[in-house]
Amino acid sequence: MLPAAPADVRLLFDDAVRPAGGNRAVDAAGNSVLGGAAHLLPGHDRVLVIPLRPGLQRGAYTVRWQVVSNDGHVVSGVLAFGVGTGLGVLRPTLSAGGGTSPASIVLRWLFLAGALLAGGAALSGWVLLEPRRRRLETAVEGPALLLVAGGGFGLLALEPAADATRFGRIVETAAIVALVGVAAALASIAVRPLAHAVTALALLELAAPTLSGHALDPRRLRWLVALADFVHLSAAAFWIGGLVLLVLSGRGSRARRRFPPLAAGAVLILGAASVPRAIAAFPTLASVVHTSYGRAVLVKTGLLAVVLVAAWLNRRRLSELGFAAELALLAGIVVAVAVLTTLPPPSRTARAAATAAPGHTAPPAPGAVVLAGEDDDVAIGFAASPRGRDVAATVTALSPDNLGVDGLAVTIAGRRAAPCGPGCYRAAVPLPAPPRRIAVTVAGGGRREATLPFTLPARWPAPAAGALVARAARVYRALRTLVIHERLASSARNAIHTTYLVEAPDRLEYHIAGGPQAVIIGRTRWDKLPGRPWVRSAQEPLRQPEPFWGTDPVRNARLLGTGRVDGRPVRIASFYDPKLPAWFVLSVDPATGRLLDLRMTAQAHFMHHTYGGFDRPLRIEPPQP
């Protein structure tokens, strides 16, 4: 729920996308509140912006979005949000739709089967066929290239928004090359040397599935994965193309003698190349079984096992019927691959704690001390890890759009930092003497130069503080009453001040200076704007008191040192929350475990809390009319 009406809805993806048709925004009654055509955020091809009509009234709204991903998937979803407070549980009034189209599977099968057959005939023809029978190779390559052209142009007609994606560009190029190859194959009947051009164009088609598919999805070592994928496809193509030539060449041909050992080698290469591809595709073993992509891979693997048995029998008997059955099973495997290309690979959420999605700032290294500062509306994170006598320092710049800010000139303790990912800059600097201050200077990107000081713990390496943070959370939840004073800023120019009164187990009252106020008791909520009467509404119960970071995972909890808050001694710790993401600094009374002060730095959120009124008499009552 949002306190004010947004101007648009922004969706961040982990790869480049293009808007597709079908984007809608409606209110609870189904009336459109779309403010314009969906578009990409300028300079960010991973952020979809869906404009909304200005001045949305209090109520529930649903947005349905649809995009084409860089590898050709049509991805859709719905998002429900509310304007105003106390709206209760929000339920979407639109459905996401989407799903895999049978037509898409058929067209992808034609495209893949054609590419594999054309490329496979080109690879195996010069090994298996006598020179006098090379026309047979062209006779296979021509129709196969026609399949590539038909499937490719059909896919582009079915998914017109894909033409600006990597998938669309590769498929369009492959289809055009295939048409040229078909023309050359026809012309080679009269001009025999053109058969060599057909073979060259057929070989080019082998690269299309790798360049347009999942192998080039953003990940580490993706070119190595792409190479493994290409080798895997080439081995499969040799097997398929060789089988077709074997069936068409007839008994007694050189192909019958040469194909069995070459096919066995192709199968071994196919299997070996599939290993790195599978490791890259599946973040966990469970994702092999519990995702549609994984189940399609299992079907493909099962069919392959059956084909291998049939192939072994065929090599012993050289049966025409057996070869036809083997080809039919291989065609089934290509169907499974066609289904795979319509499905997104499993999410790498299980590894999100260790790696950052494209466009996101990377989480700090395990064991690093984490600090943060504010450069106007950009959050500047700082992580420092011991490296011998030096400090491995990493600076991350997080924009208000929750994206890493690239192209900055960053110096750490006078040393120029090198880029290390989205919004990431890294340098090794000498460990300073106490008080261990390190200056970080940020410039460029159209921003004024700013210098932010960070102070490392006097005790180095810094001790772990997970137990201190956990104790502060337990003590906080056990309080009966609490008063919080908050300063919340979105930039150096905009800040609001709020006072919260908290009473266990489910009562909360807050008042924004010069602005709205609210009272929440169990399942009922009252809201009041300045000069307006109280408005009552339903509310999901809120468990109180609850520390601001809630049950989110706490990483990199390290002890920074000691200090005082309002004259009371405190132990100071910092940690990182990867879900927001956010950097926290806590000041905890070591005698009582009470949290006295909190600072949070996050996406356009620079917050400072001071805590008091612990367990003092306090009663939150419904407001009087």
Image (cartoon, grey):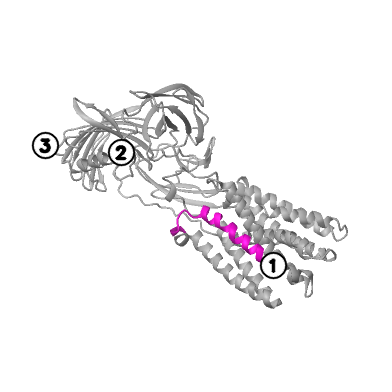
Image quadrant holding the N terminus, namely top left
Provide the residue span drawn in magenta.
Answer: 260-287
Which residue is disc 3 drawn over? 617
In the image, is 61 to the left or to the right of 473?
right
Q: Earlier in the sequence, mark 1 or mark 3?
A: 1
Q: Residues within 10 Å of mark 3 (few under 14, many from 20)?
A: few
Q: Which residue is mark 1?
A: 261
Observer-nearest of 603 and 561: 561
Identify the residue at image location x=48%, y=32%.
Answer: 425
The numbered mark, 2 or 1, whose residue comes first in the sequence reads 1
Q: Position of residue 301 (x, y in %)?
A: 55, 65
Residue 66 part of the magenta segment? no
Nearest the viewer among 261 and 29 is: 261
Residue in the picture at 73% in, 52% down: 177
Which residue bears the numbered disc 2?
464
Q: Which badge, 2 or 3, comes first in the chain's sequence? A: 2
The local secondary structure at tag 2 comes to loop
Quadrant where the C terminus is found in the figure: top left
Indicate whether 274 appears above or below 32.
below
Q: Is residue 272 magenta?
A: yes
Q: What is the three-letter code of the residue carrying label 3?
A: Pro
Mark 1 crowdedness (10 Å alpha carbons): few <14, some 14-19, many ≥20? few
